[in-house]
Amino acid sequence: MLPGETLLHIACRKRNPKAAYLLISFGADVNIPSLEPYFNTPLHIASMYDTKEIIDLLLDNGAQSAALNWSNETAFHSSCKAGAGASALKILKMGVVADINARNTGGCTAMALACRAGLREVVVECLRRGASLTEEWDNERNSLLHAACAGNQGEMAVFLINNGASPGGRGIFPNKAGLMPFDLIKNKEVKKDLQKAQMEFQAAGGLTGLRLRRKDAERAINLAAEQKEWGPSALRRGHEHQHTTHRAVVGAGMCMDITRIMLECADDMVSCRRL
C-alpha cells in the first residue's frame, strides 16, 4: 500500500477480485486517482500486477483506459513498465489503447517499455497495431535497442537487431550520455558478444539499410556465398566504397551471423537487410 490510495487501489494491489467487486458494488469510484505523487487509477494498479480478472471488472464498470498518471502513462504503459505481459496483451487485444505510439514524460512509448521488460509478444502485438521498430528515440536519445539492453534483455536485443530496429531507420547511435545500446548490457557474456557486434557494426559504417547499386550488392552476396562468410567484411570486399547493410546476433551462442539478405529492386538500387 502506498499513501493516498483508496481501498479499491489496495484491492487491486493485493490481487483480490472479490474485494474489488464488493467495493465497486458499494459505489467505489473506478477512476479515482491516488494522491501525490503518483496519481495512479485502480486500473493502473491492476495492470501492474497482472490481475486480468480485475482489469475486466474495472473496464466493465467504466474505468478509463486513457487516464494518465504522474508520468503521463496509461494503464497500458504501466503494465509494460512493470513487465506484466499478460495484462499488457489483454489491454491491447481488448482494443482500448487509443494511441499505440503515445509517449510518457520521458518520451518513451509503451513498446519501448515492453522492450526493456523483455515482453516480445507485446512488442509483436504493438507492431501489428501500427507501432514501428523505426520509432524515434526518447528524450535521452535512447532507442528501442537501448531500452532492451538497459533491461539486460539479450533475446529482445537480438530480435530488434534482426528486424532492423533503429530510430527513423538511420542506424544505431549513442544516446545523450554517449552510450551505445550494448554498453548497457549487464550480463558479462552477453555484453562481450554484443560489444564484438558493436565493433563490427561501427567498422562497417554504423548504419543500417544503406542502399547499394544492384551489381555491387550481388557481387558482395556471391562473394559471401563462395567463401561461406556473411556479414560486414564480405560486403566491404564486395564493394569498397559502400559499407554494410545490417548486422545480426543470432542463435543460443549469440554468435554473429547474417543468414539471408533480401534484394529489393528499385531501378538500379536495392535495399539490403536481413529477413
Image: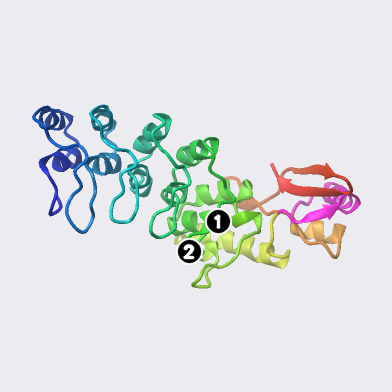
Q: In screen coordinates, is 100 left or right of 229?
A: left
Quadrant assignment, res 13? top left
Q: In screen coordinates, is 270 left or right of 121?
A: right
Check disc 2 and report the residue beneath it.
Answer: 184
How dense is the environment of label 1, judged by Cα within 10 Å: few (below 14), some, or many (20 and up)?
some
Label 1: state its secondary structure.
loop
Q: Are the residues flagged by discs 1 and 2 in contact, CB closer than 8 Å?
A: no
- Name the residue furthest right: 215
Query: Which residue is drawn at the image coordinates 49% and 72% (left, top)?
Result: 177
Q: Where does residue 113 sit, x and y in percent of width and height?
A: 42, 50
Tell me the magenta residue range: 209-231
Alpha carbon separation for disc pair 1 and 2 = 19 Å
Quadrant assignment, res 263? top right
Marker disc for residue 136: 1
* Prevalent SS, magenta region: helix
Is residue 219 visible to us here? Answer: yes
Name the quadrant of the C terminus: top right
Q: Where does residue 124 sit, x and y in percent of width and height?
A: 52, 38
Question: What count of labels does the image hold?
Answer: 2
Q: Nearer the viewer, residue 156 or 228?
A: 156
Residue type at numbered disc 2: Leu
Question: Is 56 in the magenta?
Answer: no
Q: Where does residue 193 sit, x and y in percent of width and height?
A: 58, 59
Q: Where does residue 54 sit, x and y in percent of width and height?
A: 23, 31
Is residue 253 visible to us here? Answer: no
Query: Which residue is drawn at the image coordinates 38% and 59% (left, top)?
Result: 105
- Name the residue furthest left: 26
Marker disc for residue 205: none
In the rendered view, would you say 224 is above or below 21? Answer: below
Going from N to C along the chain, the mark reached first, 1 or 2, is 1
Residue type at numbered disc 1: Glu
